[in-house]
Amino acid sequence: MQIFMDWSASNFDWNRARGFLVTAQEGSLSAAARALGTTQSTLSRQVSALEEELGVVLFERVGRGLELTPSGQELLEHVQKMGDGAKAMALAAAGQSQTLEGKVRVSASQAIALFQLPRIVSKLRQEQPGIQFEILASDSTSDLLHREADIAIRHYQPTEQTLIAKKIRESPTHLYAAPAYLERIGNPRSIKDLTHAEFIGFDDSDRFIKVLREHGLNLSKENFNIVTANTLVQWEFVKQGLGIGLIPANIAEAETGIIRIFPEFEPLMIPLWLVAHRELQSNRRIRYAFDRLAEELV
């Protein structure tokens, strides 16, 4: 015999469960209250009420923070599943929207957000003025599964099966430097002359250095005394004459006064992927934005 829970008779308060979950994640009532947009006293009452309702102690105070009790740790797993279920329901509901009005959140690197998206978003806004775009400009990866963004523009192919990805293009990166820096190191005439040059890198890992060596640059970590994951900062350091940079051609060649050195150097090709959660592909405005971005980013 199958047993169904009588939800109408349940007094379980979902807001209390959410308060417990966020407090556990944040480690303190004050941080959790800020995350939830409520007051610390309100959140404290919710957590206390949940403890009383369940008949267990969920937290114990350690210094200025809170730590889960064994009972709290055991119940946290179940509440996390509830939170994931709520996010999945919101995602499914968002996927059913058929209107071309509303917000579309697009995550992109700072370089793409600055150099490419203004023109594209302007064009899309003229076509569909009912769509509002929120641009999340960050060199960190947004979590599409938890709705940090609707669409992401990335430089790598995602592995999650719940994501839909389309490869847009591969962009060449070349060696660029300020004339003053090249003069300072004796105006090198060949790739071999760069053995002791300073490079402004976005990575000094062995993997990256190996790739550069395969392209004829005999470099080591000693060549990368300035490293930044931010392409815009890297580009500014190159322009200021602090070293040589591997910069996307569409960024570098829009700048005057910077030299592309050694045209024979084989460019490193950087892939560009457009990614969205497959649930959102049934959402008309997300579908529209996805398709138009794919066309305009080529």
Image (spheres, rainbow, N blue to C red):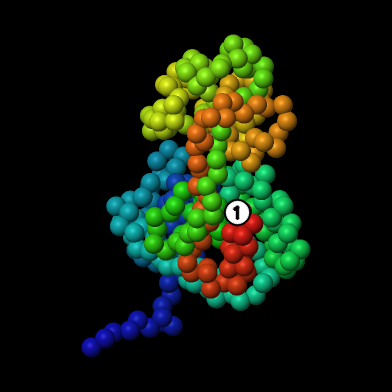
Instruction: Report which quarter residue 9 is drawn in.
Output: bottom left
Residue 50 vertical placement versus 197 (above, below): below
- Residue 16 picture location, percent across and down: 47, 63
Residue 112 appears left or right of 51: right
**Which residue is at a point 54% across and 54% down the rendered structure image?**
168
Q: Residues within 10 Å of mark 1 (few under 14, many from 20)?
A: few
Instruction: Report which quarter residue 61 is drawn in.
Output: top left
Quarter of the rendering occupied by the N terminus: bottom left
Residue 84 vertical placement versus 207 (above, below): below
- Residue 194 picture location, percent across and down: 50, 18
Q: Spot the residue most to the bottom.
A: 1
- Residue 28 picture location, percent across and down: 47, 46
Q: Secondary structure at mark 1?
A: loop
Q: Mark 1 is on which residue type?
A: Val
**Which residue is at a point 50% across and 55% down the rendered structure image?**
167
Quarter of the rendering occupied by the C terminus: bottom right
Residue 145 appears left or right of 54: right
Examine the rendering and report whether any part of residue 171 can be seen.
yes
- Residue 92 picture location, percent across and down: 49, 72
Between 183 and 221, the residue placed more toward the observer is 183
Instruction: List the residue tagged with mark 1.
Output: 298
Q: Spot the residue most to the front.
A: 264
